[in-house]
C-alpha cells in the first residue's frame, strides 16, 4: 500500500485508488459499494466490515422486496411521492419521477414514528428601480412575507431510520390568508392520514 497504491474493496473485491475509498476498522469500502447503501446509513471509520456488510445485504433484500411492492395509493407532494402498499402495510418515498429507481428504503406502517408540519417564513425587503435605474427601497422598509409548508416524517425499519422533510407548498403569499389556511388544511389532512396508517 505505497503512495500510489490502492485498496481492495472488502465487499466487491475491486482494486481502487485512494479516491472514493472509505477505510473501515478492518477493511475498505469502495465508492460503488458505498453508493448502494441507504442515504440514512452513514459510514464511520470505526465501523467493521461485518456491520457494513449487513447493511449491504439489507439493501439487496430491500431491492427484492420493492419488486413485490403493490402500490394501491400515492400521496403526491411538491417534488416527492409517498407510495403506499396498504395491503402489505408498507411505504416508500421517492422523488416523484423516480419511483422505485434508486432502491428507496421500504418502511412498515408500524415504523411511522413522527409526522408533523413545518412552516418556514421568508421575509424579503421590497425594492424598486427608480428613473435613474438605481435600486431603491423604502425607509422604513416594506417587507414581503412568504411561507413554505413541509411535511416532516420520521419512519424506521429494522435497519435504518429515515428522516424526511418533504416540500408541500412554497412561496405562499403571506397576505393571502385564505390560500395559507387552505394549503395548511390540505397538509393537516395528509398528516392525519399518515398517522392513521400507523394504527
Ligand atoms: Zn466495492
Image: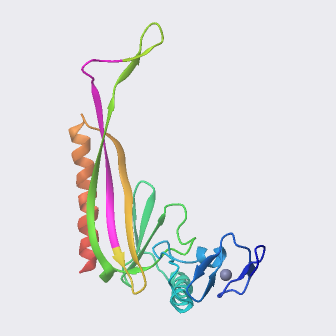
- In the rendered image, the residue lying farthest to the front is 2
Image spot of residue 122 (x, y percent) = 32, 40
- In the rendered image, the residue lying farthest to the right is 4
Horizontal side, residue 34 vs residue 72: left or right: right
Horizontal side, residue 179 vs residue 71: left or right: left
Q: Quadrant of residue 172?
A: top left
Horizontal side, residue 60 vs residue 78: left or right: right
Which residue is found at the position 57% from the left and 86% from the top?
A: 60
User: Could you tell me how many numbered marks the image carries?
Assistant: 0
Q: Foreground: 58 or 79?
A: 58
Scheme of image coloration: rainbow
In the image, residue 182 above or below residue 124: below
Image spot of residue 115 (x, y percent) = 27, 67
| Residue 146 highlighted magenta (yes or no) | yes
In the image, residue 124 above or below residue 132: below
Image spot of residue 31 (x, y percent) = 64, 73
The magenta segment? 137-154
Q: Quadrant of the N terminus?
A: bottom right
Image spot of residue 133 (x, y percent) = 48, 12
In the image, residue 88 above or below residue 138: below
Q: Foreground: 81 or 20?
A: 20
Q: Quadrant of the C terminus?
A: bottom left
Image quarter where ligand 1 lies: bottom right
What secondary structure predominates along the stretch shown in magenta?
strand
- In the rendered image, the residue lying farthest to the top is 131
| Residue 75 highlighted magenta (yes or no) | no
Amino acid at each position: 500500500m505505497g503512495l500510489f497504491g490502492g485498496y481492495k474493496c472488502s465487499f466487491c473485491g475491486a482494486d481502487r485508488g485512494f479516491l472514493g475509498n472509505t477505510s473501515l476498522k478492518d477493511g475498505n469500502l469502495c465508492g460503488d459499494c458505498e453508493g448502494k447503501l441507504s442515504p440514512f446509513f452513514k459510514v464511520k471509520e470505526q465501523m467493521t466490515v461485518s456491520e457494513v456488510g449487513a447493511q449491504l445485504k439489507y439493501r439487496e433484500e430491500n431491492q427484492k422486496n420493492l419488486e413485490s411492492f403493490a402500490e394501491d395509493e400515492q400521496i403526491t407532494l411538491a417534488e416527492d411521492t409517498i407510495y403506499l402498499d396498504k395491503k402489505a402495510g408498507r411505504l416508500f418515498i421517492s422523488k416523484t419521477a423516480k419511483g422505485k429507481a434508486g432502491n428507496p428504503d421500504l418502511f412498515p406502517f408500524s415504523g411511522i414514528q413522527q409526522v408533523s408540519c413545518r412552516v418556514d417564513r421568508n421575509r424579503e425587503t421590497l425594492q424598486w428601480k427608480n428613473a435613474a435605474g438605481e435600486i431603491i427601497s423604502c425607509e422604513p422598509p416594506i417587507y414581503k412575507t412568504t411561507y413554505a409548508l413541509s411535511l416532516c416524517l420520521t419512519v424506521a425499519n429494522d435497519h435504518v431510520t429515515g428522516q424526511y422533510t418533504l416540500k408541500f407548498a412554497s412561496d405562499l403569499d403571506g397576505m393571502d390568508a385564505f390560500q395559507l389556511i387552505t394549503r395548511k388544511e390540505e397538509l393537516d389532512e395528509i398528516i392525519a392520514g399518515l398517522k392513521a396508517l400507523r394504527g
